Amino acid sequence: MDDKFQQLLDIHEIRQVSIRYNRHADACEGEQFAALFTEDGEFDIVGNQTYRGRKEIASVCYGSVGIVHLAIDSIVEVDGDTATQTSKLIIGKVAADQSSMDLIGTTTMRDQFVRQGGQWFIKRRQSHIDTDPQLALARLAVKAQ
């Protein structure tokens, strides 16, 4: 029973990292966002760019003003001090005057996690935009800083 309990705790903690990811991204809190990744972490927006290391990862967060992330359907598999997660994100863009929000689309997230010092971190996150990536990114108007 102890192994099963630990696995449930690990899954919960990994999902908490993902929740913080979305909250920090929505608030454009680049440092906090990037701190969820390992020092050498990677964030790969497939069809666009791969951001490597916390400085580059923070830069994409700072440039994502008005974006809202809603995560659904998370599947987590834990294997010791590593784990994988597959989930969907629904992405919206809030109008500058906050009068409305446009649905940009969905993306399939494929994550690799690693436990370091007793905490879970994202080692690699791949965002596979489910529609044409260039059109979706243009609508989001995300710019690295």
Image (tube, rainbow, N blue to C red):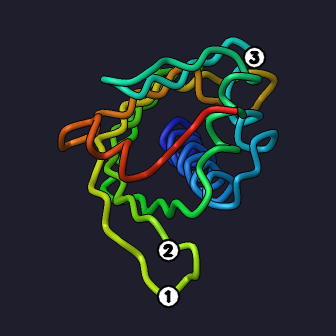
Q: Is residue 120 visible?
A: no
Which type of secondary structure does the marked residue at label 1 adopt?
A: loop
Q: Residues under labels 1 and 3: Cα distance?
A: 38 Å
Q: Residues under labels 2 and 1: Cα distance?
A: 6 Å
* Total residue callouts: 3
> Where is mark 3, residue-wise?
39
Q: Label 3 amino acid?
A: Glu
Instruction: Choose the circle earlier in sequence order: 2 or 3.
Output: 3
Give the left or right position of residue 127, taking residue 63 as reference: left
Crowd band around label 1 with a 10 angstrom C-alpha radius: few (<14), some (14–19), many (20+): few
Q: Residues under labels 2 and 3: Cα distance?
A: 34 Å
Which type of secondary structure does the marked residue at label 3 adopt?
A: strand
Within the image, what quadrant is residue 107 found in?
top left
Residue 1 percent location from the top left of the image: 50, 44
Name the residue rendered at 49%, 18% in the picture. Answer: 50
Instruction: Choose the circle earlier in sequence order: 1 or 3.
Output: 3
Q: Nearer the viewer, mark 2 or mark 3?
A: 2
> Where is mark 1, residue-wise?
99
Vertical comparison of 38 with 108: above or below: above
Question: What is the number of the mark on residue 95?
Answer: 2
Q: Label 1 amino acid?
A: Ser
Q: Is residue 11 visible?
A: yes
Q: Nearer the viewer, mark 1 or mark 3?
A: 1
